[in-house]
Amino acid sequence: MGRRAGHPEQAAFSATCDSGSCLTLMTDRRGRVLHFGAEAERLSGYGAEEVVGRPIWEVLVAEDQRAAVAAAFGRRRPRVAPAVVDWVTRDGRRRSIAWATRELPDGPEPGRLLFTGTDLTEQRLARGLLTSVLDADSGLAILGVDTSGTLTFVSPGAERLLGRSAHDLVGTPCTDLHDPADLVARARELGDADPREALLGAVRHGVPRERRDWLLRRGDGSTMTAAVTVSAMRDGLGRVTGFLLHPQDVTAERRAQEHLESALATERDAVGRLQALDEARNEFVTTVSHELRTPLSNILGYAEVLLEDEVDELTPAQRRVVERVNRNAERLHRQVQDLLLLTAVDAGTFVPDRAPVTLSEVVGKALDQLGPETRDRVDVDLGDGDTTVLGDGPRLVGVVRGLVDNALKFSDDQDLVHVHVRRDGSERVLEVADSGVGIPRAEQQHLFQRFFRCAGARTIAAQGLGLGLAVTAAVVAAHDGHVVIDSDEGSGTRVVVRLPSDAAVA
């Protein structure tokens, strides 16, 4: 409690001051403390008995300010205007106190001065920290704007970013930083006829923290795209007193983004054109294939009639010509069938007709389609186990025929092609191996692509459209199987087809 409570009026005054949280003290005209309030005791760490009766500057005032405070009380009429004086607490901490002084009317002790104080220490520390951050020579760009849109401070980083000094910017409207055309466009977006009002409206109404792109002008007249973050500054009562703007130059990033978006749009357009071309190609292939099927069937039919034993009017030379016509027509017919099958695969309409069939039967039927000369070049090992699968017999025969044809085509005439059928757990395995030219490793990833022909095929001018392995992969996949190719250039090729057994499918 404050001292000097002996006089009733003084005691009442002391009780009133000590009942609240206000920082109060009373002195006479010479600066001698008459009353030291409870809040003053708490803040300073000194008891009233240590302070009352002594000049205020002796105990509380910081040493570097004592002379000035003593001089103020030494005047004929002490200064009573507000002033900030630093106290030093008992534990040595320095507190900044803003004092308001009022001269009390004459009472038991004439000439009394009443001091009421506000502790500004935390506020000054916070302000000093903010000032240090804003004045730091760093790349951080910060602009201060009041609620009318006027720039109040500019950090060194903002000076460098904008190419303009704080001296030139402080006190000017923040709209002067913006590109006029950009402001007009943004005003249209916000439905405001006045571009400046469109920008300042958000400031005046205290929008929440946001980040958006603006086009800002540099000191040299050039423009940049800046992503600006806006944060509201508030006073102790929560009222908006201004805004902090944090602009970042994102010109390069936005240009890169625009280039990327343009490239993506170009790519999407190209993909669309390719899809249209692919659809047109499929439609063309389907149409041509259907148109070829009928005449090819007629050619094959007439060739078979001419080659029958009952027809003996053909000379040996004529028979050889008809046999060649028949072989080429069969090859063309198989290619047409391949094209139609792949078209059905693309359309999602290809579904194999499944029935139990052994791979031994499939291999036998495929080899029956070969001529005597080529049949002698195929070494067959059908194994001794059950090789039954649930599959489309004719389609699987076509797979074997295509793999054997490829192996024969890319091998020397004296080399054998090996066909092996076996069981492997729940799978049935077909292997076709040759010792021919092989396939370069770099080309193997393209083998199942349609119309792809490896370098070896082009070198030996082998016939074909490059559809064989694509058809093989499609048929095997439709049977829930898969194909693996193992090959090295100059060392031959081994193709392994794995299919689930009929029991596994069931």
Image: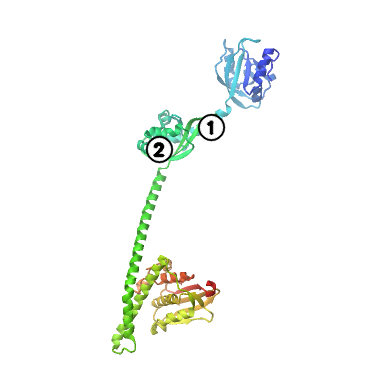
User: Measuring 67% from the left and 17% from the top, which residue is drawn there?
Assistant: 14
- Determine the secondary structure under disc 1: helix
Given residues 95 and 424, the one toward you in this image is 424
* Callout 2: SS: helix
Give x and y (percent) for residue 312.
Answer: 30, 90
As shown in the figure, which amino acid type bears the numbered disc 1?
Answer: Leu
Taking depth in this image into account, of 502 and 277 the one nearest to the observer is 502
Q: Quadrant of residue 247?
A: top left
Apparent side of residue 405 relative to residue 502 in the rendered image (left or right): left
* Residue picked out by circle 2: 190
Residue 191 can be seen, yes or no: yes
Q: Residue 391: where, in percent of width, then height?
A: 48, 74
Q: Callout 2, which amino acid?
A: Leu
Which numbered tag is attached to residue 183? none
Nearest the viewer among 287 and 49 is 287
Q: Quadrant of residue 288?
A: bottom left
Judge whether 271 appears above or below 41 on screen. below
* In the displayed structure image, the side of residue 438 where residue 45 appears, left or right: right
Q: Residue at x 62, y 27 (%)?
A: 93
